[in-house]
Image (cartoon, rainbow, N blue to C red):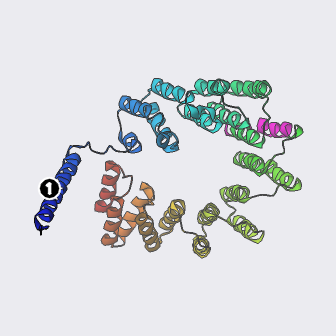
Amino acid sequence: MVSLRPIRRFFHAGTVIASAETSAAILNQVQTSKPVEEPALIKLKAERDPEKLFHLFKANAHNRLVIENRFAFEDTVSRLAGARRFDYIEHLLEHQKTLPQGRREGFIIRIIMLYGKAEMIKHAVDTFYDMHLYGCHRTVKSFNAVLKILMKTRDIGALEAFLRETPEKFNIELDIISVNIVVKGFCDMGILNRAYLLMLEMEKLGIRPDVVTYTTLISAFYKVNQCEISNGLRNLMVLRGCLPNLASFNVRIQYLVDRRRAWEAKKLMNVMKNIGIVPDEITYNLVMKGFCRAGFLEMAKRVYSALHGSGYKPNVKIYQTMIHYLCRSGDFNLSYTMCKDAMNKNWFPNIDTLHSVLKALKKMGQPGKAQLILTLATKRVPPFTTSQLEALNTTLVNS
């Protein structure tokens, strides 16, 4: 009878040899393969050389992870603009228009806005006018994008020409967003009467002002101390069935605080709550600032407590307001506590306020607390400048 043992030993040996050879082949392949490249987004973010950045972005013109990433696109254009390489920006953006994404209006709007941020105004406007060349349909959305850019130029002639000629040429009907862009632009330029007249003209064409329109005008007239007009607009808004929102109330509260009418501001905040409009951090900060300016620090502290009771947490502006006025009133223990809490959250008061806190703590014989504030200041992200930190240290040593 033939024994099967030699055959079994043969196959076992063959299996071991084959397994060893396979493992060696895999190991060799791993050792000789190229290292995995970093993702394009990471490489773009890390690249600082404008020319290399340009070529890297161009090489990823078809990479959807790059092209559809708004931050990567904006950051690249921003850095090229900072290096004044407008030729690179033009090359990249014009190339993008010719690709499939150039047929989407949303994408072309992004191109228009990027040209605007780079202050390449003519390129932005031309992009709008040439949209049909890329097979892209125009709507009022792309029209509004150009309006925003022209508003920033403060070129009234170019703006009025665009408003007068373009809608009819491309059969575009303006909407309330168009009106609000122009109204805000005119208000920012200080031509409030023209902004108001534009609102009236658009209303005749069937575009009813909304709460944004009215709030923009009310805020602008308050800033130039024409409160009668602002109050009239508020009444007109309500009469026409356009109810005020949170921003509308904050604008009014800001006006009252600026006029040292803190109690009226607080009363208005209560009215908001009664009609179902929840105050936000801006509202609380304004009312606190109003009481601090008027010398009612205890009331400011109560509002600060009410902020916590409403489920909000202080932000940097609220901390800044309270710490500044607590220092001025001599309540240094509370100012220290708030300062420490804010800095632990990487929310830092300005340098002048930190100087006041350090001086007060040193004067009160609490150098340990003062040193802690200085130590926290060195951990700020982004950091204070070397000269600012040296000044703080000098304050601590010399106080």
Residue at screen point 34% across, 71% down: 369
- Residue type at mark 1 is Ile
Residue 399, visible in the rendered structure? no
Q: Which residue is mark 1?
A: 17
Q: Position of residue 263 (x, y in %)?
A: 70, 67
- The answer to which of 139 and 183 lies nearer the viewer is 139
> On the image, which quarter does residue 259 sit in?
bottom right
At 34% from the left edge and 44% from the top edge, which residue is drawn? 38
Is 385 displayed left or right of 324 in the figure? left
Seen at 79% across and 49% down, the residue is 210
Name the side, left or right, on which 273 lies relative to 373: right
Q: Give whichever of 15, 233 is nearer the camera.
A: 15
Classify residue 12 as left or right of residue 338: left
Is residue 190 covered in magenta? yes
Q: Nearer the viewer, residue 239 or 96?
A: 96
Image quarter where the C terminus lies is bottom left
Residue 347 position within the rendered picture, expressed as x and y whole percent measured from the top left: 45, 60
- Provide the residue span drawn in magenta: 188-202
User: Residue 45 or 315: which is nearer the viewer?
Assistant: 45
The image shows residue 80, relative to residue 389, as above or below, that is: above
> Residue 389 location, x and y as percent?
33, 54
Figure quadrant of residue 273 = bottom right
Q: Position of residue 339 (x, y in %)?
A: 44, 66
From what the image shows, is residue 183 above or below residue 351? above
Residue 291 seen in the figure:
yes
**What residue is shown at x 70% (from left), y 28% (from top)?**
159
